[in-house]
Image (cartoon, grey):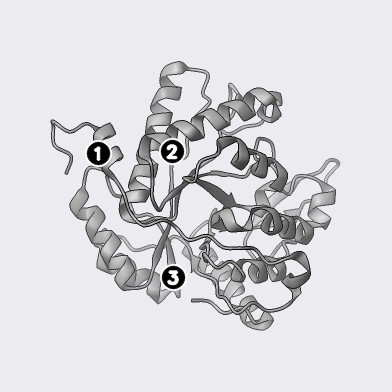
Amino acid sequence: MISGKESRRNFIGKIAGLSLLTGVALSAEEQSSVSSGSVRLGAPVFEKSDDPELLALAHKKMRYRAAYCPDVSISDSNKIKAVSETFARHNIVIAEVGRWCNMMDADPEKRKNNLENVTEGLALAEAIGAHCCVNIAGSFSPDSWFGPHPKNLSTEFFDAAVENARKVVDAVKPMRAKFAYEMMGWSLPDSADSYLNLLKAIDRVGFGVHLDPCNIINSPDRFYRNGDIINECFDKLGPHIVSCHAKDLTWDVEMNVHFREVCPGTGAMDYTVFLKRLAGMPQQPPLMIEHLSGAEEYDQARNYILDHGQQIGVPFT
């Protein structure tokens, strides 16, 4: 526990651990061949207990070898230790700590609090052994914490994203966890190139890549060529990828372009390319299913991904 005399900043500064391994991505030409690696799949589980053993067993029952970070306070060192050790014993990695808030909020006090929240999230990821703490870079929208705004693609936004990432990483100084931005279709990073530019500008070992290819399918061209987009992400960002999201996308035919998230296997995303490229990552970034309505839909998504992997020769850990 953090004592009354020990500040959160001091606690964060003391967190240390082993460095997360990185590797080299397959080339686009190699993606069609089956990798000798495997994929770690994960998703939410609907286990009401907060007991680490029961939570780990609930993941194993669903054939998951990756998990979202359980609900645990940064101040509860005993719970952190129990979760970390129990999940490791069952060979389940903690993929990510999500801290979803606007780090570019127009209100200075809210922006400060959100930055502290994300910094605490990275500290938790480091302490519990998660691959990363993830958040979107933010938004200048006055109406939605994640919504579109013209300045979300601007140099001002890019510079703010760089500054915020450096502040978070420099406060925690992680040795194994990474801080990462989730890709978005209407704010940076919105492509492999924009993410690569952020990586170079942030220039911190503690900053990595969170890959959500579905989020950057924001035009007919990208929709039709989503396999090429996935390959580009792995070619340019592969060694830095620490966690991935599994979703799917369909095109609802209207008088303007309308893409909609759907259960994996019911849309147009190229899971053959996605799974093969992911299996080629030596650091084995987890693949985490998200945004579904309940246990039945998560079962459907899991079964599709596992079955499709078997069909194309991609094993799961």
**Alpha carbons under labels 3 and 2: distance apart:** 27 Å
SS class, disc 3: loop
Judging by the rendered image, the residue that carries numbered circle 2 is 169
Mark 1 or 3: in front is 1
Q: Is residue 315 left or right of residue 188?
A: left
Judging by the rendered image, the residue that carries numbered circle 1 is 11
Residue at the location (62% across, 32% down)? Answer: 147
Task: Tell me which corner region of the image, top left, top right, bottom left or bottom right, holds residue 258.
Answer: top right
Task: Tell me which corner region of the image, top left, top right, bottom left or bottom right, holds residue 121.
Answer: top left
Name the amino acid, label 2.
Answer: Val
Question: Does residue 174 lie above or below 57 as drawn?
Answer: above
Residue at the location (38% across, 62% down)? Answer: 46
**Which one is earlier in the sequence, the residue at label 1 or at label 3?**
1
Q: Is residue 127 left or right of residue 143?
A: left
Q: Is residue 205 left or right of residue 219?
A: left
SS class, disc 2: helix
CB atoms of marks 3 and 2 within 8 Å? no
Question: Does residue 265 lie above or below 216 as drawn?
Answer: below
Name the amino acid, label 3.
Answer: Arg
Judging by the rendered image, the residue that carries numbered circle 3 is 65
**Alpha carbons under labels 1 and 3: distance apart:** 30 Å
Q: Position of residue 190 (x, y in %)?
A: 69, 41
Which is nearer the eye, 291 or 79? 79
Q: Is residue 39 visible?
A: yes
Q: Position of residue 82 (x, y in %)?
A: 23, 60
Q: Residues within 10 Å of mark 3 (few under 14, many from 20)?
A: many
Viewport quadrant of the N terminus? top left
CB atoms of marks 1 and 3 within 8 Å? no
Q: Is residue 292 visible?
A: no
**Which one is earlier in the sequence, the residue at label 1 or at label 2?**
1
Residue at the location (66% across, 39% down)? Answer: 197
